Amino acid sequence: MIAKIQFIQGLDEKVLPDVKLTRSRDGSTGTATFRFKDPNILDKSTAKEGEITGMYLIDDEGTLETKDVNAKFVNGKPEAIEATYIMRSPDAWDRFMRFMERYSETNGLVFTKAN
């Protein structure tokens, strides 16, 4: 199974996100902020599929889920989707990183460490 992201269950998001990661100094918690510019979920053709119910990160191990999903509007039109996934333990961080490794392999993404 390939790693994928969905906002409506059963409908894969095709636009690749910009992902920013932060982690506490002791490694106990972390946050991943996803930004999708002009995602296909905002296309009129996908409106009939249903409403956005969250962000679902799906891979071989199962599904990671967040309900913290917001649309960004410019001049009254949706332009981007931002979603935040919070990891509350080192195990949750490790699980998220395994998902991201699979997702990056599937989509040809690279990890760039901040300065």
Image (cartoon, helix red, strand yellow):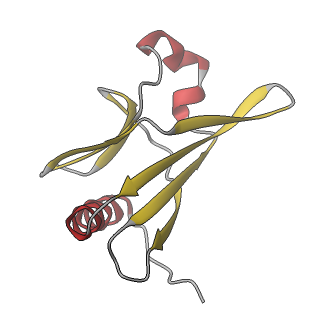
Q: Position of residue 35 (x, y in %)?
A: 58, 51
Image vertical order of residue 45 relative to residue 25, above or below: above
Query: In what quadrant of the picture does the C terminus appear?
Result: bottom right
In the shown orientation, is residue 3 left or right of residue 53? left
Q: Position of residue 96 (x, y in %)?
A: 29, 61
Image vertical order of residue 93 relative to residue 111, above or below: above
Q: Residue at x 41, y 32 (%)?
A: 54
Camera-side residue of 89 and 55: 89
Q: Residue at x 35, y 65 (%)?
A: 104
Q: For residue 30, what is the image quadrant?
A: bottom left
Q: For residue 71, what is the image quadrant?
A: top right
Marker count (numbered): 0
Q: Position of residue 102 (x, y in %)?
A: 25, 62
Q: Residue at x 40, y 55 (%)?
A: 86
Seen from this angle, which residue lies furthest top? Answer: 48
Seen from this angle, which residue lies furthest bottom? Answer: 115
In the shown orientation, is residue 47 left or right of residue 108? right
Image vertical order of residue 114 relative to residue 49, above or below: below
Camera-side residue of 100 and 107: 100
Camera-side residue of 28 and 52: 28
In the shown orientation, is residue 11 left or right of residue 60? right
Q: Position of residue 51 (x, y in %)?
A: 47, 17
